[in-house]
Amino acid sequence: MSIKKIWYESARLFLKISLHFYAKKIKVYGKNNIPKKGAVLFAINHPNALMDPLFVTSKNKRENHYLVRADVFKKPLIKKALATLNLMPIYRIRDGRKQLSNNQEIFEQCFDILKREETLIIFPQGGHSRDRNIKPLSKGFTRIVFGALEKNPTLEISVIPVGITYQNSSSFPSKVCIHFGEHINSREILSKNEKPKAIHILKNEVRIQLEKLTVHIPDDENYAATLNKLNQANVDFTNINAVNKMIAENNFPKAKKKPVNILKPLYYIILLNSIFPLIIWKKISKSIGEIEFVDTMKFATNVISFPIFYTLQALVIRFFFGWNIAVIYWFLSFLLVFLYTKFSVLNTEDQLL
Protein backbone atom coordinates (compact mmCIF):
# COMPACT_ATOMS: atom_id res chain seq x y z
CA MET A 1 0.00 0.00 0.00
CA SER A 2 1.40 3.40 -1.01
CA ILE A 3 2.00 6.25 1.45
CA LYS A 4 -0.72 8.28 -0.31
CA LYS A 5 -3.19 5.42 0.11
CA ILE A 6 -2.29 5.02 3.80
CA TRP A 7 -2.78 8.77 4.31
CA TYR A 8 -6.14 8.72 2.51
CA GLU A 9 -7.46 5.73 4.48
CA SER A 10 -6.18 7.20 7.77
CA ALA A 11 -7.95 10.48 7.01
CA ARG A 12 -11.15 8.62 6.14
CA LEU A 13 -11.02 6.61 9.39
CA PHE A 14 -10.55 9.82 11.37
CA LEU A 15 -13.44 11.32 9.42
CA LYS A 16 -15.73 8.38 10.19
CA ILE A 17 -15.04 8.67 13.91
CA SER A 18 -15.35 12.44 14.09
CA LEU A 19 -18.62 12.52 12.12
CA HIS A 20 -20.20 10.23 14.73
CA PHE A 21 -19.35 12.87 17.32
CA TYR A 22 -21.00 15.49 15.09
CA ALA A 23 -24.15 13.83 13.75
CA LYS A 24 -26.91 12.37 15.92
CA LYS A 25 -27.68 9.67 13.38
CA ILE A 26 -26.39 8.81 9.90
CA LYS A 27 -28.82 6.75 7.83
CA VAL A 28 -27.44 5.02 4.73
CA TYR A 29 -29.45 3.33 2.00
CA GLY A 30 -28.50 1.75 -1.31
CA LYS A 31 -24.86 0.88 -0.54
CA ASN A 32 -25.33 -2.31 -2.54
CA ASN A 33 -25.75 -0.12 -5.63
CA ILE A 34 -22.07 0.88 -5.47
CA PRO A 35 -19.94 -1.30 -7.80
CA LYS A 36 -16.94 -2.83 -6.05
CA LYS A 37 -14.79 -2.00 -9.08
CA GLY A 38 -15.01 -0.07 -12.33
CA ALA A 39 -15.40 3.63 -13.14
CA VAL A 40 -18.14 5.38 -11.16
CA LEU A 41 -19.37 8.95 -11.16
CA PHE A 42 -21.41 9.88 -8.08
CA ALA A 43 -23.83 12.73 -8.86
CA ILE A 44 -24.79 14.29 -5.51
CA ASN A 45 -27.18 17.07 -4.52
CA HIS A 46 -25.43 19.84 -2.62
CA PRO A 47 -27.22 21.35 0.41
CA ASN A 48 -24.34 21.72 2.85
CA ALA A 49 -21.00 22.66 1.25
CA LEU A 50 -18.05 20.35 2.05
CA MET A 51 -20.04 18.36 4.59
CA ASP A 52 -21.78 16.60 1.69
CA PRO A 53 -18.71 14.84 0.24
CA LEU A 54 -17.42 14.12 3.76
CA PHE A 55 -20.55 12.21 4.73
CA VAL A 56 -20.73 10.38 1.40
CA THR A 57 -17.04 9.42 1.55
CA SER A 58 -17.35 8.14 5.10
CA LYS A 59 -19.98 5.63 3.93
CA ASN A 60 -18.35 4.61 0.66
CA LYS A 61 -15.48 2.09 0.63
CA ARG A 62 -14.21 3.19 -2.79
CA GLU A 63 -11.39 5.76 -2.88
CA ASN A 64 -13.05 8.92 -4.18
CA HIS A 65 -11.90 11.95 -6.15
CA TYR A 66 -13.85 15.19 -5.89
CA LEU A 67 -14.53 18.34 -7.86
CA VAL A 68 -14.88 21.29 -5.48
CA ARG A 69 -15.46 25.00 -6.13
CA ALA A 70 -12.15 26.69 -6.85
CA ASP A 71 -12.32 29.45 -4.23
CA VAL A 72 -11.72 26.83 -1.52
CA PHE A 73 -8.19 26.39 -2.94
CA LYS A 74 -7.08 30.03 -2.71
CA LYS A 75 -4.49 29.52 0.02
CA PRO A 76 -1.45 27.47 -1.16
CA LEU A 77 -1.18 25.40 2.04
CA ILE A 78 -4.87 24.47 1.94
CA LYS A 79 -4.57 23.69 -1.78
CA LYS A 80 -1.75 21.20 -1.12
CA ALA A 81 -3.59 19.61 1.79
CA LEU A 82 -6.80 19.17 -0.22
CA ALA A 83 -4.89 17.73 -3.17
CA THR A 84 -3.52 14.92 -0.95
CA LEU A 85 -7.15 13.95 -0.27
CA ASN A 86 -8.05 13.84 -4.00
CA LEU A 87 -9.88 17.19 -4.13
CA MET A 88 -9.65 19.16 -7.39
CA PRO A 89 -10.81 22.73 -8.14
CA ILE A 90 -13.57 23.46 -10.64
CA TYR A 91 -13.89 27.05 -11.87
CA ARG A 92 -17.15 28.93 -12.41
CA ILE A 93 -18.00 32.16 -14.19
CA ARG A 94 -18.02 33.99 -10.86
CA ASP A 95 -14.33 33.05 -10.49
CA GLY A 96 -13.58 35.04 -13.65
CA ARG A 97 -13.93 34.08 -17.30
CA LYS A 98 -10.14 33.77 -17.66
CA GLN A 99 -10.14 31.08 -15.00
CA LEU A 100 -12.61 28.92 -16.93
CA SER A 101 -9.82 27.81 -19.27
CA ASN A 102 -8.26 25.99 -16.28
CA ASN A 103 -11.21 23.60 -16.28
CA GLN A 104 -9.93 21.84 -19.38
CA GLU A 105 -6.90 20.60 -17.45
CA ILE A 106 -9.21 19.45 -14.64
CA PHE A 107 -11.46 17.66 -17.13
CA GLU A 108 -8.43 15.82 -18.51
CA GLN A 109 -7.58 14.70 -14.97
CA CYS A 110 -11.16 13.47 -14.58
CA PHE A 111 -10.91 11.54 -17.85
CA ASP A 112 -7.77 9.83 -16.54
CA ILE A 113 -9.42 9.01 -13.20
CA LEU A 114 -12.33 7.34 -14.96
CA LYS A 115 -9.99 5.60 -17.42
CA ARG A 116 -8.23 4.04 -14.40
CA GLU A 117 -11.69 2.80 -13.34
CA GLU A 118 -11.73 4.88 -10.18
CA THR A 119 -14.52 7.04 -8.75
CA LEU A 120 -15.40 10.71 -9.07
CA ILE A 121 -17.79 12.79 -6.96
CA ILE A 122 -19.54 15.68 -8.70
CA PHE A 123 -22.33 18.09 -7.73
CA PRO A 124 -24.41 18.40 -10.91
CA GLN A 125 -26.49 21.31 -9.63
CA GLY A 126 -23.39 23.46 -10.08
CA GLY A 127 -23.70 25.14 -6.67
CA HIS A 128 -24.94 24.53 -3.16
CA SER A 129 -28.32 25.48 -1.73
CA ARG A 130 -30.10 24.67 1.52
CA ASP A 131 -33.48 24.76 -0.22
CA ARG A 132 -35.22 21.42 0.12
CA ASN A 133 -35.42 20.68 -3.59
CA ILE A 134 -33.31 19.71 -6.57
CA LYS A 135 -32.21 22.67 -8.66
CA PRO A 136 -31.74 22.47 -12.45
CA LEU A 137 -28.68 20.40 -13.32
CA SER A 138 -25.77 21.77 -15.31
CA LYS A 139 -24.34 19.76 -18.19
CA GLY A 140 -20.77 19.90 -16.85
CA PHE A 141 -20.94 16.40 -15.39
CA THR A 142 -22.23 14.99 -18.70
CA ARG A 143 -19.27 16.59 -20.46
CA ILE A 144 -16.93 14.65 -18.17
CA VAL A 145 -18.78 11.36 -18.52
CA PHE A 146 -19.20 11.46 -22.29
CA GLY A 147 -15.73 12.96 -22.81
CA ALA A 148 -14.18 10.01 -20.98
CA LEU A 149 -16.29 7.54 -22.96
CA GLU A 150 -15.31 9.12 -26.28
CA LYS A 151 -11.61 9.01 -25.38
CA ASN A 152 -11.83 5.39 -24.26
CA PRO A 153 -14.14 3.32 -26.51
CA THR A 154 -14.05 0.24 -24.24
CA LEU A 155 -14.66 2.14 -20.99
CA GLU A 156 -17.88 1.67 -19.00
CA ILE A 157 -18.94 4.36 -16.51
CA SER A 158 -21.66 3.85 -13.92
CA VAL A 159 -23.41 7.09 -13.00
CA ILE A 160 -24.97 6.81 -9.54
CA PRO A 161 -27.15 9.66 -8.21
CA VAL A 162 -26.78 10.21 -4.46
CA GLY A 163 -29.28 12.10 -2.34
CA ILE A 164 -28.14 13.62 0.94
CA THR A 165 -30.68 15.06 3.37
CA TYR A 166 -30.12 16.88 6.68
CA GLN A 167 -32.60 17.32 9.45
CA ASN A 168 -31.08 20.67 10.48
CA SER A 169 -28.41 22.08 8.20
CA SER A 170 -25.86 24.17 10.10
CA SER A 171 -27.19 23.07 13.49
CA PHE A 172 -25.52 20.73 15.97
CA PRO A 173 -26.23 17.89 16.14
CA SER A 174 -28.18 16.82 13.08
CA LYS A 175 -29.54 13.65 11.56
CA VAL A 176 -28.33 12.85 8.04
CA CYS A 177 -29.62 10.50 5.37
CA ILE A 178 -27.41 9.30 2.51
CA HIS A 179 -29.24 7.45 -0.26
CA PHE A 180 -27.27 5.87 -3.11
CA GLY A 181 -29.44 5.55 -6.21
CA GLU A 182 -29.54 3.05 -9.02
CA HIS A 183 -26.82 2.58 -11.62
CA ILE A 184 -27.25 4.51 -14.89
CA ASN A 185 -25.48 3.01 -17.91
CA SER A 186 -23.89 6.05 -19.56
CA ARG A 187 -22.29 4.01 -22.37
CA GLU A 188 -25.67 2.68 -23.43
CA ILE A 189 -27.19 6.18 -23.46
CA LEU A 190 -24.37 7.58 -25.61
CA SER A 191 -24.33 4.64 -28.03
CA LYS A 192 -28.06 4.86 -28.73
CA ASN A 193 -28.39 8.63 -29.10
CA GLU A 194 -26.78 11.65 -30.67
CA LYS A 195 -24.67 13.48 -28.10
CA PRO A 196 -27.05 16.46 -27.51
CA LYS A 197 -29.92 14.03 -26.88
CA ALA A 198 -27.68 11.79 -24.75
CA ILE A 199 -26.81 14.80 -22.56
CA HIS A 200 -30.50 15.57 -22.10
CA ILE A 201 -31.34 11.94 -21.25
CA LEU A 202 -28.52 11.56 -18.71
CA LYS A 203 -29.38 14.85 -17.00
CA ASN A 204 -33.04 13.88 -16.86
CA GLU A 205 -32.38 10.41 -15.43
CA VAL A 206 -30.11 11.84 -12.72
CA ARG A 207 -32.64 14.57 -11.86
CA ILE A 208 -35.55 12.11 -11.59
CA GLN A 209 -33.59 9.91 -9.19
CA LEU A 210 -32.33 12.82 -7.08
CA GLU A 211 -35.88 14.09 -6.59
CA LYS A 212 -36.72 10.69 -5.05
CA LEU A 213 -33.47 10.25 -3.11
CA THR A 214 -33.88 13.45 -1.08
CA VAL A 215 -36.78 15.63 0.07
CA HIS A 216 -38.01 17.57 -2.96
CA ILE A 217 -40.46 20.45 -2.57
CA PRO A 218 -41.23 21.87 -6.04
CA ASP A 219 -39.72 25.33 -6.43
CA ASP A 220 -42.99 27.19 -7.06
CA GLU A 221 -45.25 29.68 -5.28
CA ASN A 222 -46.22 27.01 -2.71
CA TYR A 223 -42.65 26.18 -1.65
CA ALA A 224 -42.53 28.38 1.47
CA ALA A 225 -45.99 27.32 2.68
CA THR A 226 -45.18 23.63 2.19
CA LEU A 227 -41.87 23.91 4.04
CA ASN A 228 -43.59 25.79 6.86
CA LYS A 229 -46.20 23.02 7.26
CA LEU A 230 -43.48 20.37 7.41
CA ASN A 231 -41.50 22.35 9.99
CA GLN A 232 -44.58 22.98 12.13
CA ALA A 233 -45.35 19.26 12.09
CA ASN A 234 -41.77 18.63 13.21
CA VAL A 235 -41.38 15.90 10.58
CA ASP A 236 -38.26 13.78 10.30
CA PHE A 237 -36.86 14.93 6.95
CA THR A 238 -34.55 11.92 6.86
CA ASN A 239 -37.64 9.73 6.38
CA ILE A 240 -37.50 10.79 2.75
CA ASN A 241 -40.21 8.58 1.23
CA ALA A 242 -42.76 9.54 3.88
CA VAL A 243 -42.05 13.27 3.55
CA ASN A 244 -42.13 13.20 -0.25
CA LYS A 245 -45.48 11.38 -0.06
CA MET A 246 -46.84 14.19 2.16
CA ILE A 247 -45.68 16.74 -0.40
CA ALA A 248 -47.10 14.86 -3.40
CA GLU A 249 -50.48 14.33 -1.73
CA ASN A 250 -50.54 17.78 -0.09
CA ASN A 251 -51.41 15.99 3.14
CA PHE A 252 -49.45 17.10 6.20
CA PRO A 253 -49.57 16.05 9.86
CA LYS A 254 -50.96 18.46 12.41
CA ALA A 255 -48.63 21.02 13.93
CA LYS A 256 -46.68 19.79 16.94
CA LYS A 257 -44.98 21.64 19.73
CA LYS A 258 -41.22 21.63 19.53
CA PRO A 259 -39.84 18.93 21.82
CA VAL A 260 -37.98 19.97 24.93
CA ASN A 261 -34.30 19.13 24.91
CA ILE A 262 -33.79 17.81 28.42
CA LEU A 263 -30.05 17.51 27.76
CA LYS A 264 -29.65 21.26 27.26
CA PRO A 265 -27.86 21.63 30.66
CA LEU A 266 -25.28 19.12 29.38
CA TYR A 267 -24.79 21.34 26.33
CA TYR A 268 -23.79 24.25 28.56
CA ILE A 269 -21.44 22.05 30.57
CA ILE A 270 -19.73 21.09 27.30
CA LEU A 271 -19.49 24.75 26.31
CA LEU A 272 -17.92 25.62 29.66
CA ASN A 273 -15.40 22.82 29.25
CA SER A 274 -14.70 23.95 25.66
CA ILE A 275 -14.36 27.70 26.20
CA PHE A 276 -11.21 28.10 24.09
CA PRO A 277 -12.59 26.24 21.03
CA LEU A 278 -15.77 28.32 21.45
CA ILE A 279 -13.79 31.56 21.35
CA ILE A 280 -11.97 30.37 18.21
CA TRP A 281 -15.26 29.43 16.56
CA LYS A 282 -16.86 32.79 17.38
CA LYS A 283 -14.00 34.58 15.63
CA ILE A 284 -14.04 32.29 12.60
CA SER A 285 -17.83 32.41 12.25
CA LYS A 286 -17.76 36.18 11.67
CA SER A 287 -15.83 35.71 8.42
CA ILE A 288 -18.18 33.11 6.88
CA GLY A 289 -19.93 34.73 3.93
CA GLU A 290 -22.31 31.91 2.91
CA ILE A 291 -24.64 30.12 5.30
CA GLU A 292 -24.01 26.80 3.51
CA PHE A 293 -20.41 26.91 4.77
CA VAL A 294 -21.35 27.33 8.45
CA ASP A 295 -21.55 23.58 9.09
CA THR A 296 -18.31 22.90 7.22
CA MET A 297 -16.34 25.51 9.14
CA LYS A 298 -17.92 24.53 12.45
CA PHE A 299 -17.01 20.88 11.90
CA ALA A 300 -13.46 21.71 10.79
CA THR A 301 -12.94 24.00 13.80
CA ASN A 302 -14.34 21.49 16.27
CA VAL A 303 -12.55 18.43 14.92
CA ILE A 304 -9.20 20.21 15.25
CA SER A 305 -9.65 22.40 18.33
CA PHE A 306 -11.54 20.06 20.66
CA PRO A 307 -8.94 17.25 20.76
CA ILE A 308 -6.08 19.75 21.06
CA PHE A 309 -7.59 21.74 23.91
CA TYR A 310 -8.96 18.72 25.77
CA THR A 311 -5.45 17.25 25.65
CA LEU A 312 -3.83 20.52 26.81
CA GLN A 313 -6.37 20.86 29.62
CA ALA A 314 -5.74 17.24 30.62
CA LEU A 315 -2.01 17.97 30.84
CA VAL A 316 -2.72 20.92 33.14
CA ILE A 317 -4.89 18.69 35.32
CA ARG A 318 -2.14 16.08 35.35
CA PHE A 319 0.28 18.70 36.69
CA PHE A 320 -1.96 19.30 39.74
CA PHE A 321 -3.74 15.96 40.24
CA GLY A 322 -1.72 13.25 38.46
CA TRP A 323 -2.17 11.07 35.40
CA ASN A 324 -5.19 9.07 36.61
CA ILE A 325 -7.41 12.13 37.04
CA ALA A 326 -6.10 13.67 33.80
CA VAL A 327 -6.93 10.56 31.75
CA ILE A 328 -10.39 10.30 33.34
CA TYR A 329 -11.03 13.98 32.52
CA TRP A 330 -9.85 13.47 28.90
CA PHE A 331 -12.15 10.50 28.27
CA LEU A 332 -15.06 12.11 30.11
CA SER A 333 -14.80 15.27 27.95
CA PHE A 334 -15.26 13.28 24.75
CA LEU A 335 -17.93 11.08 26.32
CA LEU A 336 -20.06 14.10 27.22
CA VAL A 337 -19.89 15.39 23.64
CA PHE A 338 -20.80 11.95 22.29
CA LEU A 339 -23.75 11.55 24.69
CA TYR A 340 -25.14 14.98 23.84
CA THR A 341 -24.73 14.35 20.12
CA LYS A 342 -26.53 11.00 20.20
CA PHE A 343 -29.30 11.67 22.73
CA SER A 344 -30.28 15.35 22.50
CA VAL A 345 -33.66 16.22 20.97
CA LEU A 346 -33.78 17.87 17.55
CA ASN A 347 -36.16 20.37 16.00
CA THR A 348 -36.82 20.48 12.27
CA GLU A 349 -36.19 24.14 11.60
CA ASP A 350 -32.79 25.10 10.19
CA GLN A 351 -31.40 27.41 12.82
CA LEU A 352 -27.94 28.17 14.12
CA LEU A 353 -26.96 27.40 17.69
Image (spheres, helix red, strand yellow):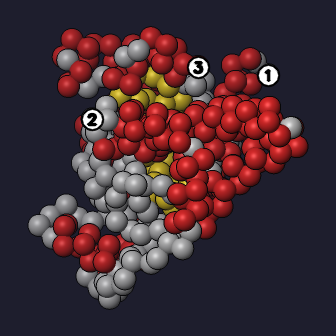
Q: Which mark is residue 1?
A: 1
Q: Is residue 214 above or below residue 112?
A: below
Of the residues under marks 2 and 1, which one precedes in the sequence?
1
Of the residues under marks 3 and 2, which one precedes in the sequence?
3
At mark 3, the secondary structure is helix
Q: For mark 3, what is the residue?
A: 84
Q: Identify the residue at image location x=49%, y=47%.
A: 160
The label nearer to you, 3 versus 2, is 2
- Nearer to me, 106 or 334: 334
Q: Which mark is residue 218?
A: none
Residue 316 in which image quadrant: top right
At mark 1, the secondary structure is loop
Q: Which mark is residue 289?
A: 2
x, y percent for residue 41: 49, 38
Q: Identify the residue at image location x=48%, y=55%.
A: 172
Marks 2 and 1 sit apart, C-alpha to C-alpha, by 40 Å
